[in-house]
Image (tube, helix red, strand yellow):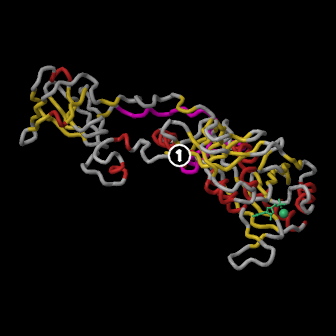
C-alpha cells in the first residue's frame, strides 16, 4: 500500500482515506430556513389567517441579531440564518404581503421547527464522517469542502509506467515496413491504467536490446510506483527481456504459465533501489489487457488502499452457446452484456476470440469465465466479470431506466435533454 499523504481535494477523487475524517465544524453551521418565506413564532399563527408586522428582511449571506417578537415576522430567503425569537418559517406561497410591505397575512399554521434546518442536522461537530478506507466519491469531496477541509489524508494514486517491447513494433503513422506491426498494447494499457484511477506514465517502445531495456526499466522504476511491460515473457521469446529483467530484479522475477486463456504467460518481480514492482504482461493484445485485469489491476488497487480488488462479477444468462474445449484452463471469453426484460444480465459473444483479435475486446463490456470443460449452452448460466458496468445497457428499448421513471410528458428524457416544458428550481 502506498504511504498516505495529504491530497488536495481536486486530486483526491477515487482515492482511499487512510484515517477517519472527523468534522471540525457542524453542517449546517447555523439554524437556517429551507424555504423563502417569513420567520415567525409558531404560536402567533396557531389560528389563521393571522396578520403579523414585517420587521425586517434577511437574505442568504446576511444575519439579524434583533429578536422576532410577539406578532412579528421577518422576511427570509432560503439559507438565511433563522433570527432569534423565531422558531418556524412559513413559506411565501402561504402568505400575502400588504402593498407597502409592512404587514403579512399568514394563511396556514406552521409548527415550531417547520422549514427550519437545524445546526448540525447534516453533520455534527466532532462526528466521524468517514472511516479509514472510504473511497472518496464526489459526494465525499463535497462534504469535506463543507467542513472547510482543503485536503484529505489518503493513499495517493499509483503512478504506473507502461512500456512496449519488441523489435517488430513500428512507431509513427507512416506505412509499415515489411514484418513490422503497430504498437497496440501501450495505448490500451495506458488507457486501462487511467480508467482504473491511476496515473499513467508513457515509457514508450523499447527495442529488444539489453542496454535500451535496462535503461528504460530502471528509469521507469525511478519515476513510477509500478511498471507494466508487454511482450517478451512467453516461452520461446528471444531472451533479451527476460535476461534484463532477471538481472535488474536481483532474481526476484518469476516467469509463470497461468492456467488461463488468454493471459497465460506472465512475469512478476521487483526492480531498482525501491523494489518497484514490474508486471511482465504477454505481447498478444487481448492477453495483455486480460493479464492487466487479472494480475496487475488488483495489485495496483491494493497499492492504492482499496479493499475490493477485483472487477464486479455476477451470474448472467448466455443468450447463445459459448463453446470451448477442455484443456485444463479457465477461459475468458469477450462478451457483450446487457440487461434483459427479466431483470437479469444476458451475454453474447463479442466476436473473434483469438488472443490477437482485439476488436472483440474493444466491443466487449464483460469477460465470461468458462471453467475447464465444454463451455455453456444457449440459455445456460455463466459467471461474468464486468469490465465497464456503465456500458451494461438494456437489451430492449422498452426496458425502462431511471430517466423514464421521472414521469411528465415524454418522461424525464425531455428534462435531461434540456427541453423542460416548465421552469423549475
Ligand atoms: P511476445 O509476447 O513478445 O512473444 O508477443 C506475442 C505476440 O504479440 C506477437 O505476435 C507480437 O508481435 C505481439 N505483440 C507484442 N507486443 C505488442 C504490442 N505492443 N502491440 C501489438 N502487438 C504486440
Ligand atoms: Mg516479443
On the question of residue 107 being in view, the answer is yes
x 81%, y 51%: residue:
276
On the question of residue 218 being in view, the answer is no
Q: Residue 25 magenta-drawn?
A: yes
Quadrant of the rendered image holding ligand 2: bottom right
Disc 1 target residue: 150
Quadrant containing the N terminus is top right
x 7%, y 42%: residue:
100
Residue 265: x and y in percent read 84, 51
Q: In this view, does 145 lie to the left or right of 74?
A: right
Instruction: From this view, report whether residue 342 is shown above or below residue 114.
Output: below
Residue 261: x and y in percent read 78, 48
Q: Quadrant of residue 345?
A: top right
Q: Give the range drawn in magenta.
A: 1-30
219 or 336: nearer the eye?
A: 336
Residue 307: x and y in percent read 67, 36
Q: What element carries label 1?
A: loop
Q: Quadrant of residue 222?
A: bottom right
Q: Quadrant of residue 259?
A: top right
Rate crowding at label 1 as few (under 14), some (14 to 19) or many (20 or more) other CA atoms within 10 Å. some
Instruction: From this view, report whether residue 34 is shown above or below residue 49.
Output: below
x 33%, y 49%: residue:
415
Quadrant containing the C terminus is top left
145 or 329: nearer the eye?
A: 329
Q: In this view, does 165 lie to the left or right of 159?
A: right
Q: Main secondary structure of the magenta part?
A: loop
Amino acid at each position: 500500500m502506498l504511504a498516505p499523504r495529504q491530497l488536495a481535494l481536486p486530486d483526491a477523487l477515487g482515492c482511499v482515506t487512510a484515517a477517519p475524517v472527523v468534522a471540525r465544524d457542524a453542517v449546517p453551521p447555523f439554524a437556517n430556513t429551507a424555504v423563502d418565506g417569513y420567520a415567525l413564532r409558531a404560536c402567533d399563527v396557531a389560528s389563521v389567517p393571522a396578520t403579523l408586522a414585517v420587521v425586517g428582511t434577511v437574505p442568504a449571506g446576511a444575519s439579524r441579531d434583533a429578536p422576532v417578537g410577539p406578532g412579528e415576522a421577518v422576511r427570509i430567503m432560503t439559507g438565511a440564518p433563522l433570527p432569534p425569537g423565531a422558531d418556524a418559517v412559513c413559506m411565501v406561497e402561504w402568505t400575502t404581503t400588504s402593498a407597502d410591505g409592512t404587514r403579512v397575512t399568514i394563511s396556514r399554521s406552521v409548527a415550531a421547527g417547520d422549514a427550519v434546518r437545524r445546526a448540525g442536522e447534516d453533520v455534527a461537530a466532532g462526528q466521524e464522517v468517514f472511516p479509514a478506507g472510504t473511497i472518496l466519491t464526489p459526494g465525499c469531496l463535497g462534504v469535506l469542502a463543507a467542513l472547510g477541509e482543503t485536503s484529505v489524508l489518503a493513499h495517493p494514486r499509483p503512478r504506473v509506467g507502461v512500456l512496449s517491447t519488441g523489435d517488430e513494433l513500428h512507431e509513427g503513422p507512416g506505412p509499415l515496413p515489411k514484418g513490422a506491426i503497430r504498437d497496440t498494447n501501450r495505448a490500451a494499457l495506458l488507457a486501462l491504467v487511467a480508467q482504473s484511477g491511476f496515473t499513467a506514465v508513457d515509457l514508450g517502445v523499447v527495442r529488444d536490446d539489453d542496454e535500451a531495456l535496462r535503461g528504460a526499466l530502471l528509469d521507469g522504476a525511478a519515476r513510477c510506483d509500478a511498471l507494466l511491460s508487454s511482450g517478451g515473457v512467453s516461452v520461446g521469446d528471444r531472451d533479451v527481456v527476460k535476461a534484463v529483467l532477471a538481472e535488474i530484479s536481483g532474481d526476484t522475477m518469476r516467469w509463470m504459465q497461468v492456467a488461463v486463456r488468454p493471459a497465460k504467460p506472465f512475469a512478476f518481480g521487483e526492480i531498482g533501489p525501491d523494489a518497484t514492482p514490474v508486471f511482465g504482461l504477454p505481447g498478444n493484445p487481448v492477453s495483455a489487457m486480460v493479464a492487466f485485469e487479472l494480475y496487475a489491476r488488483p495489485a495496483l488497487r491494493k497499492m492504492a488502499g482499496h479493499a475490493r480488488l477485483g472487477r464486479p462479477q455476477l451470474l448472467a444468462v448466455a443468450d447463445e452457446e459459448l463453446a470451448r474445449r477442455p484443456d485444463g484452463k479457465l477461459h475468458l471469453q469477450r462478451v457483450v452484456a446487457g440487461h434483459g426484460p427479466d431483470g437479469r444480465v444476458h451475454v453474447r459473444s463479442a466476436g473473434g476470440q483469438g488472443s490477437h483479435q482485439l476488436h472483440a475486446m474493444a466491443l466487449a463490456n464483460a469477460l465470461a469465465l468458462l471453467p475447464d470443460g465444454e463451455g455453456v449452452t444457449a440459455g445456460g448460466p455463466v459467471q461474468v466479470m464486468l469490465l465497464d458496468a456503465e456500458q451494461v445497457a438494456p437489451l430492449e428499448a422498452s426496458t425502462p431506466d431511471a430517466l423514464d421513471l421521472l414521469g411528465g410528458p415524454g418522461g424525464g428524457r425531455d428534462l435531461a435533454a434540456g427541453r423542460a416544458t416548465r421552469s423549475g428550481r
